[in-house]
Each structure stands twice: as C-alpha cells, then as structure tokens.
Amino acid sequence: MPLFTTIQLAFAFGILGNVVSFLVYLSPLPTFYRIFKRKSTEGFQSIPYSVSLFSAMLYLYYAYLKKNEILLITINSFGTGIQLIYLTIFMIYATKSAKIFATKLLIGFNIVAFGAIVGLTYIFAKENELRISIVGWICAVFSVSVFAAPLSIMRRVIQTKSVEFMPFPLSFFLTICAVMWFFYGLLKKDMYIAMPNILGFSFGIAQMILYAIYRNRKQQVLPDLSLMDLKEIAIDMKAVVVEIIQENVDGENKNKQEEVDSVDEKKDDNDKQDVALTTSNV
C-alpha cells in the first residue's frame, strides 16, 4: 500500500505551487515601490502585468468549468487581485501615452478577448467537457507564449555577457513553480496544466545555466535615469562648459595683454635707440 495516494500528492504539489506562485506574484513589489517613490513609471511597461492578469483570469474560468479546483481558484484569484493593484499604480504615475497604451491592452486582452472566449464557448460549446477542452487548450497555448517570453532576456544576457537583467532568485522561483504545477497536472491527469510547465521548467533551467556561465563576467551597464537625474547631469555639464569657456577667454586676454606689453617694450627700446643716436650726432 503506497504511503500517499495520488490525490494527496496532487494536493501537496498544489499547495506548494500556490506558495511559490504567491512569491512570484509579489516579486514586482520593489518595482512598484520605486514607481511610487519617484512618482514616475520611468522605463517600465504595463505589458507583463496585463498579460499576467489575462492568464490569471483564463485559469479562473478554466477552474470554474472543471469544478473542485480550489487550488487553482485560490492562487489565480490572488493573481487577478494583485495584478489589478499593480496596473492601478501604473496608471496613476504613467505618462499620458503609457496610460493610453495600457488602457488599450486592458480593453483588448481583459475585456474583449476574455469576453469573447467566455461568450463563444458558452454559445457554441454546449457540452461542458467540450467547453473545458477548448478553454484548456487556450490556457495551454497562452501559457506557452508566456513561458517563451524570457527568450528575449536570455538573448540579451548572451549578447551583453551580463546577468543584470536576469535576477537569479526570480529564475529559480519560476523554475520551482513550473515543477510544482507540472506534477500537480500530471497527478491530476490534466495535460492542459502539465504540458506548458514542461516548457517553463526547460526555460528556467536554461536561464540558471546562463546565470552560472555569466555571473562572474558581469559588465557595467548604464542604469536607467530619471528626468531629475538627466536635469542634474545637464546642469553639471553646463557648468563645466562655462568654466572651460571662461578659462579660454582668460587665456586669450592674457595672451593679448602679453602681446601689447611686448609691443610697448619694443617701442620703448626703439625710442631709446633713437635718443642715443640723436645724442651721439649732437
């Protein structure tokens, strides 16, 4: 007789997946504290948070259709709530163009696309099993696209030979998260959860390998500068330029004065010679 049943193991992996996913959802907190402190979104984008919100909403709908998926409901409810908070803070401090872009994303992803998925599956998929299958495939495909997003970061690491843009803790927790949800899906015989996390685990391992290769070859990369930082740099540069110009002007004035003094000295010498000649002639 096995020590733990399949249901118990699936529940354990689901709990661990909730804990790790909870930490991953909280990972952007330093970013938003920085936005709040500086009252500016600087170079940050709203795309990751809109995409994450859409993913959480999809899995909430999937869990609602499957029934008895309390572990999926808990973590994706938290994910939906925290992403809404992040996006609210972003919208408060973003520039006008960034607000317009974020609003278009929210309307496109979280209202139009999500509404279309819910509406069309209820209209055309009359049987619940078919509805679960359609929504499951949508969730799986979207999760694969989300897991593929780090490819651009990995390419940047290889190009710059720097891991500054790929923090190890985040890569580590995303890998652990993928492992937990893979085994949860495998034990629950839910391929729509298990399959995407195979890719997530693979990319996580690849990121950690890159980190191991390039962690000691960290290069200095220019930091992001705020508008105030740029103003201070401009003021400092202006002061330096003014100082250089003043030194050049002083140098030119000094050279001119030396030339005048030299001419006067020659004139005096000539006068003295004329006087001497005149005296000798007399």
Image (cartoon, rainbow, N blue to C red):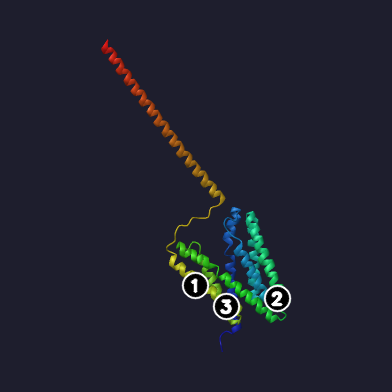
Is residue 126 rendered to the left or right of residue 89?
right
Q: Amino acid at mark 3?
A: Met
Point out residue 175 in the picture as x, y percentages from the top left corner: 53, 72
Residue receiving disc 3: 195
Residue at the (45%, 39%) spot, across then down: 244
- The image quadrant where one finds the C terminus is top left
75 shown above or below 34: below
Q: Which of the 4 image quarters holds residue 272?
A: top left
Residue receiving disc 1: 205
Is residue 151 rendered to the left or right of residue 276?
right
Q: Amino acid at mark 2?
A: Thr
Number of numbered tags placed on the structure image: 3
Point out residue 204 in the picture as x, y percentages from the top left corner: 51, 71
Point out residue 15 in the picture as x, y percentages from the top left corner: 60, 75
Q: Which of the 4 image quarters holds residue 143?
A: bottom right
Q: Are marks 3 and 2 in contact (CB under 8 Å)?
A: no
Point out residue 57 in the picture as x, y percentages from the top left corner: 66, 70
Q: In the image, which is nearer the foreground, mark 3 or mark 1?
A: 3
Q: Which of the 4 image quarters holds residue 125?
A: bottom right
Marker disc for residue 121: 2
Question: Which of the two discs, 3 and 1, labels the residue nearer the N terminus?
Answer: 3
Question: Which of the two discs, 2 and 1, labels the residue nearer the N terminus?
Answer: 2
Q: For the view shown, which residue lies furthest in the left direction?
A: 280
Residue at the (58%, 82%) spot, across then down: 187
252 shown above or below 24: above
User: What is the crowding at mark 2: few (fewer than 14 residues within 10 Å), some, or many (at least 20)?
Assistant: some
Give the Cα distance between marks 2 and 1. Answer: 36 Å
Give the Cα distance between marks 3 and 2. Answer: 22 Å
Q: For the view shown, which residue lies furthest in the top direction?
A: 282
Q: In the image, which is nearer the foreground, mark 3 or mark 2?
A: 2
Q: Are marks 3 and 1 in contact (CB under 8 Å)?
A: no
**Could you tell me which secondary element the residue under label 3 belongs to?**
helix
